[in-house]
Structures are given as C-alpha cells and as structure tokens.
Image (tube, coloured by chain):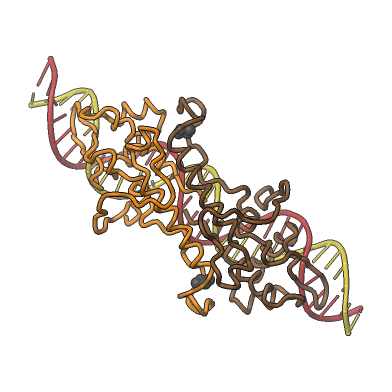
Chain colours: A brown, B orange, C red, D yellow
Amino acid sequence: MNLITRDTDYAVRALCFMAQNPERVVSVTDLGTRFAIPRQYLRRILQSLARHNILESSRGQGGGFKLRKHPSRILLSDLMEVFHGALDFTRCVFRSAACPNQANCPLRKTVKQIEKNALIELRATTIASLVSGHPAAKAGRKAPGKRPAKQRNEKSR
Amino acid sequence: MNLITRDTDYAVRALCFMAQNPERVVSVTDLGTRFAIPRQYLRRILQSLARHNILESSRGQGGGFKLRKHPSRILLSDLMEVFHGALDFTRCVFRSAACPNQANCPLRKTVKQIEKNALIELRATTIASLVSGHPAAKAGRKAPGKRPAKQRNEKSR
DNA sequence: AAGAATGATACCATTAACATATCATAAGGG
DNA sequence: CCCTTATGATATGTTAATGGTATCATTCTT
Ligand code: FES
Ligand code: FES
C-alpha cells in the first residue's frame, strides 16, 4: 500500500539530477555511484524512461541519458504510470456474481473519488517542482499540458 | 499500489451488512455464503476486527459477530489500519547514507502532503456513510470523533 | 580493434497479498 | 453428557508484485 515504489523513487532522483544538469549526458555508472543505487536496476529504469520518451539516450563511449522533456512537463504521475500502468487504486475484488450493484457500489465510488483527488495532486507534481522545492501540489488544481493518448507500460512484458 | 486490499473490501461488506441488521448475531458461515467470500479467510478478518473492538463475538451454537460500535464511528481508515498498520504511503527507500536531506526531501514532503489529504477523506468515510450511500468524503473536511491512542495491527505477529 | 556505453531480455530473491488447515475452547440443544 | 456449531489462535501454503542480477547484442568514440 505504498504509492511510491523504488522504481519511482530512483527515477525521481535521477531525473532531478539531470534537471539540474541539463545538456549534460549522464551515464548509469555515474548516477549509480552518485546515489548508491544498484547499477543494473537503475539501468533498467532509465531504459524504460527512454522508451517512454522521457529520456534521450546515446550509446557508446561518453554515452548516457539526458532529459528529452522540460522538467516541468515530467509529472510524478507519468513516472508511476511507466512502472505500474494506469493508476488504479480501487480494482474491485468481487468477481461479477457477488456484487449486485457494481455500477454504484458506495465503497468503489468513494475510493474512486479519493483516487481522483490524489491523482490531481500527483499530476501537479513535476520534476521541476520537486527540484525547486515549491510544492506545486495543491489539491484542486488541474495540471497543465496535454496528456498524450496512451502508452504501454513496463508490465506488459 | 492498491489502497483497498481484499481484507478491507471483505471487511467493509461484512460490516455494512451488520450495520443494516443490528442486534442480529451473524455467523461467518452465513456471511461467507451470502457474499461468496472464502470462509476461513473471512473468519480471520472478523476475528481481527473483534480483537480491535470493532466487533463483538459470541461463541458456540447460535454464535457469531455483531457491531460493537455505531456504524458512524467505524472509519474506513480504521479498517485499513487494522490490516496494514499505520497508513504510510511514503516510506523512504534510501538507507541513511544516500539522501543528504531526509528531513526536507521534496519528494517525501510532497507525497506526505498527498497522503495527508487522502487520509482526511478516508477518515471521513464510515460504515454508516457507505451504507447510506452519502459520500461523506469531501476533501478538506475533518472527521469527527476522537481517535484512541494506539493499537497493535495484525502484522505484528 | 578495444572499450565504454545502452538495448533487450531472461532470470533470481524477497516480500506482501491472498488463502487454507488445524487444534483448542466455549455454548447450546438433543 | 456429548454432539454440533460456533469462535480463538496460529501455522502453513500459494501466488503475484517488488526489488535486484546477469548476459548477449549493438552502437559509438577513440
Ligand atoms: S464490491 Fe465490487 S463493486 Fe461493490
Ligand atoms: S529520498 Fe529518502 S528522504 Fe529523500
């Protein structure tokens, strides 16, 4: 029941660093030692982010990763979705038969609402806001920028 | 990354039923068949709730469970805490060394705030509100009633 | 050509979630 | 009284999600 998993946590740290060092191409080895993150693990994470067009990668000597988007356009929710797929805090537990009124089950409805509010805040949190320390996440604000149609996450493997 | 686990979901269903049939003592067998919930599993759940003074139990033939508290005083957050311990959406992943500023790490601070808002809504949701269908969970409202000091959860086994 | 990097992917380990099984104890009805 | 029905407590098993390694292929720089 933890919103932020390691993937997300590691990703945030790496991205924040890159946000503070734009232009610079950083290698996994560098980041790994810098933040004491297991090398291979971090590598997989950054490769995912590259596949999702959040990072730009270059191979070979002197290669590594750098941001492909402006830090203010990388949302915390984006990262979570990369690692977990579409965010859903309330999958129904009852297989068809049991729940007579799936459509308006009060628990489901209530939790959906809570989820919706949390999502607004997660979308208001960006790498830029994290770096600046300004908590952009005030409940009720809508996040700026258009969200693209859809994107495969890293679970469909 | 699901807020509501089965334990909570099952518990809510059972409690809602009891709320609608106060006085009546319901057995696990009854509830189990009624909602198609695995018998032994539900049993453990209700036993936990009894230990946490949410339910009152009676043994022997004709025994079972009934509410010990008024439905409006059983909070959704209470149930979640019974099964997961104190709610914490943001355990830090970095062992001491790595994060220089644990105290005011922006990610931690931000997520804590989101958690806090969600908690307010979870505390505003009660068995009574679920039964009535009135979503008592409006962001920003403080839940009524005093919370007791502390209570062991079902993970400390 | 060598070396340093990512791309892709398969694999392993640990933990949490979900579920069952069992023995003990208590209460009620023949 | 003893048999049945119930909970109390707790041990055990199963599955899925999370956290972490390993390896081979490819690309780029020097
Ligand atoms: S419990 Fe699944 S929709 Fe109500
Ligand atoms: S990453 Fe752990 S406190 Fe900042």
**Percent coordinates x, y for residue B34 in the rendering:** 37, 25
Instruction: Please state if B129 lies on the left or on the right of C27 as rendered.
Output: right
Q: Residue at x 23, y 41 (%)?
A: B69
Q: Which quadrant, please, contains the C terminus of chain B? A: bottom left
Residue located at (63% from left, 53% from top): A81
Say how many tags the image has: 0
- What residue sits 27% from the left and 29% below the top? B27
Q: Nearer the viewer, residue B133 or B100?
A: B133
User: Could you tell me residue B40's position as x and y percent?
Assistant: 35, 36
- Answer with left or right where residue A77 lies relative to residue B9: right
Q: Is residue A12 above or below residue A115?
A: below
Q: Quadrant of residue A121?
A: bottom right
Residue B59 x/y as whole percent: 19, 34
The answer to which image quadrant residue D6 occupies is: top left
Q: Quadrant of residue A124?
A: bottom right
Residue C22 locus on image (x, y percent):
31, 39
Above/below status of A72 relative to B37 = below
Please name whichever residue, C23 or A123, is drawn nearer the observer in this view of the structure: A123
- Name above or below for residue B139 compared with residue A70: above
